[in-house]
Amino acid sequence: MACQRNQDTANFVFNGKKIVGVALNYMCAVKARKVAVPTVPLVFLKPTSSYIREGSPIVLPKVFNKVAYEVELGVVIGSRCKNVSKEHAMEYVGGYCLALDLTAQCNLTAARATGGPWTLGKGFDTSTPVSSFIPFDAVQDPHALPLWLKVNGEIKQSGCTADLIFKVPDIISYVSKHMTLEENDLILTGTPHGSEAFKAGDVIECGLADLATMKFKVCDE
Ligand SMILES: O=C([O-])CC(=O)C(=O)O
Ligand SMILES: [Mg+2]
């Protein structure tokens, strides 16, 4: 049975227990990185303390010297699910958002070299800016949404969710085999290619189809 779906965009609070990220989920990003095409979703977690909404700045932590933007479609879980099949996965989607999965590339490069976790490079404070909640019914097809990102007015990322390697039902089904997904948990579906480092003083603006835009100033810690 489909979950009870929130229609209240204005008052929605991102208060789920976890943020689940998927890495390298666009073929263009895989090619740009010159890495193997993933055979299963590459999953990581971010703390919910990393959320910010428009009006708060992105704060670059002192400990990092290379933080990159990643524009992404966010999927908000509508109700608890475990071991859900691909066929039933969309019944557990409560809605969507536009999100940034800010990433300290300096930390991830070191982590990749040692096989270490991505936690610090993905989970720092302000590393997950999110737009207003987009109700489920506002999106006919989550796999036909253009998304873009500009830095200081210049276009830097431009993609379409049609190019996702693992689609929304694939991700929900796969993740829910390993951990229970709960109401208002957020899934970050991955970023198209073009992710680059940015700096204090920059203004980052991004959009998802005609559904959401958001704009953030960047400052140093
Ligand atoms: O930061 C990374 O290397 C991977 C990632 O999140 C993405 O592809 O969206
Ligand atoms: Mg990402």
Image (tube, rainbow, N blue to C red):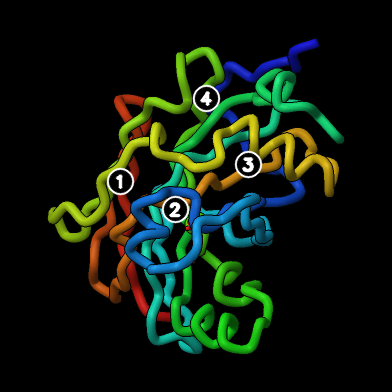
* Mark 4 or 3, nearer chain start: 4
Res 9 label: 4
Query: In the picture provided, is 180 more to the left or to the right than 140?
Result: right
Give the Cα separation between the discs numbered 4 and 3: 11 Å
- Quarter placement of the C terminus: bottom left
**Residue 98 seen anywhere in this rendered image of the structure:** yes
Give the Cα separation between the discs numbered 2 and 3: 14 Å
Query: Comparing marks 4 and 2, which lies closer to the viewer?
Result: 2
Look at the picture and state if 17 lies above or below 94. below
Percent coordinates x, y for residue 32 in the rendering: 33, 63
* Image-quadrant location for residue 45: bottom right
Circle 3 SS class: loop
- Amino acid, disc 1: Cys
* Mark 1 or 2, nearer chain start: 2
Q: Are marks 3 and 1 in contact (CB under 8 Å)?
A: no
Percent coordinates x, y for residue 9 in the rendering: 52, 24
Circle 2 SS class: strand
Query: In the picture provided, is 153 more to the left or to the right than 41?
Result: left
| Number of numbered labels in the structure image | 4
Circle 1 SS class: strand
**Residue 53 seen anywhere in this rendered image of the structure:** no
* Mark 4 or 2, nearer chain start: 4
